[in-house]
Amino acid sequence: MKPERALLVDVNGVGQPSNACSALRPILEPGFNVEVLVQSPQIVADGKAGFGASLNKRFNPVLVFVVSPGLLKETRLILESIKRGIADTPIILINESREPEDMLELLRAGASDFITTPLQAADVLPRAWRLLKSANAAGKATDAFGCQSVMRQLIGESPCFASQVMKVPLVARCDANVLISGETGTGKELFARAVHYSSSRASRPFMPVNCGAIPVDLVENELFGHERGAFTNAFALQTGLIEEANGGTLFLDEIDCLPTLAQVKLLRFLQEREYRPLGSSKMRRANVRIIAASNLNLEEAVGNGKVRQDLFYRLNIISLALPALRQRREDIPLLAHHFLKKYAREFSRPIAGFSVDALPTLMAHNWPGNVRELEHVIERAVALCEGPLIGPEDLALSSSHSARPPESLQEAKSREIALFEKNYIQELLRSCSGNITKAARMAQKNRRAFWQLMQKHQIDASSFKPAGL
């Protein structure tokens, strides 16, 4: 049986394969017949990239290697060029950039997956083979494992929420680590499930674990398992969550609660895809996608030493920032009616809807527990309501979160500054057609700081791009 072909496109200004490209070729050659094509960024930018005979062959997958993270435009053009030639072939992008927004833009342009440097054979080959085997089957398999069911639970039409929902299919298409941020009750696990069940891993396990609920001295045992006799009372072998999730997805909620030693071992697994169970003398391998989540600002957690910086960078390849319910109040009626139908059916209660005063009461509440709190409030109201409509008296909301006290000068000032920042960034992106680099330059800020402001205000650059880009 002949090995599959892979076209390795090296985009650089040198004219010969880069050192990184040369390092990548021997990683691929055990499983693929590799052809290398060196392409000038300027030729690609001018639209003159001719892949000629190389694209007339059947390559699967195609790998595009970009030396500089500054070649975003050129990379997008080269992806579009390849997709025109072989639209059904998956593309793995090897890129130095670690900006999550860059990665999403390249996924929109046609990349099936991407891997950031430094390269590891244990990371590259399994992902290449996974894409190769699932290219034709992934779309057929996912619905059978609950993709549509989970996606229907992502309820909301507000722009800040819809922009995150729109990212799910893109994120699911690749195999990169994902970091989901958001307050308690905003739906982080639901989004993680949506990514898993929309991906080619849907037929394999989805293993959720709350890192904050595991006793500190048992964290490593839970993640990596142990051999018989590894410690007192270890009378039998125990598999860890990583092994149980093999082939699927491991969702690590409250990742900031992992103790330092467990963070170090998790980092090694992320880098090498290998781990050692407690009491074992042998390393084991596992093909697991990691999705992590936290209700904290992890950059601040890195600054105060709670989370290792290298672990944060490894997890934050793609980020999803979920808005609080008070930031998308227009979605409250949709969610309230959804939960009403759910629990009226579950409890067999003939409740038709909400009274005239009930929905405004829900809209005025600040929802510190977010969607989870709203669901519990509606569930309790359905169970206890004695009439055909749920009224304000059935909602049992805490008044401390409903009344809004007068703002202090500092609060009013902060709110106005935040509003100015958001409007300013949106206008810049609109004038730059969604080009983050150009907008950051006009704002006289470095690109990362500008992107962080976008994340802070839940702004999606893709909504400012002209149609078709």
Image (tube, grey):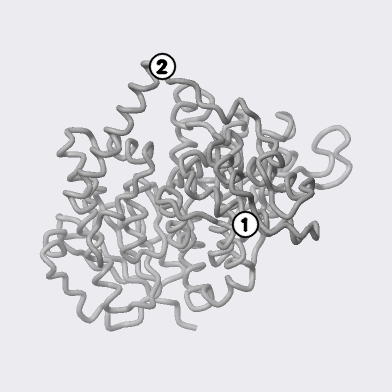
Q: Residue at x 57, y 59 (%)?
A: 196
Secondary structure of the residue carrying numbered label 2: loop
Residue 223 seen from this side: no
Q: In which quarter of the image is the C terminus?
A: bottom left
**Quarter-of-image position of residue 45:** bottom left
Q: Residue at x 36, y 58 (%)?
A: 24
Q: Residue at x 74, y 34 (%)?
A: 218
Residue 423 seen from this side: yes
Residue 427 is labelled as none
**Quarter-of-image position of residue 422:** top left
| Cα–Cα gap, marks 2 and 1 | 37 Å
Task: Give the image location of residue 268, x and y in percent.
Answer: 54, 41
Residue 338 is labelled as 1
Specify the amino acid type for callout 1: His
Specify the amino acid type for callout 2: Ser
Mark found first going from the N terminus, 2 or 1: 1
Image position of 200 (left or right of 320): right
Task: Give the image location of residue 55, x and y in percent.
Answer: 27, 78
Image position of 84 (left or right of 273): left
Query: Disc 2 marks which residue?
Result: 408
Task: Give the image location of residue 92, x and y in percent.
Answer: 38, 63
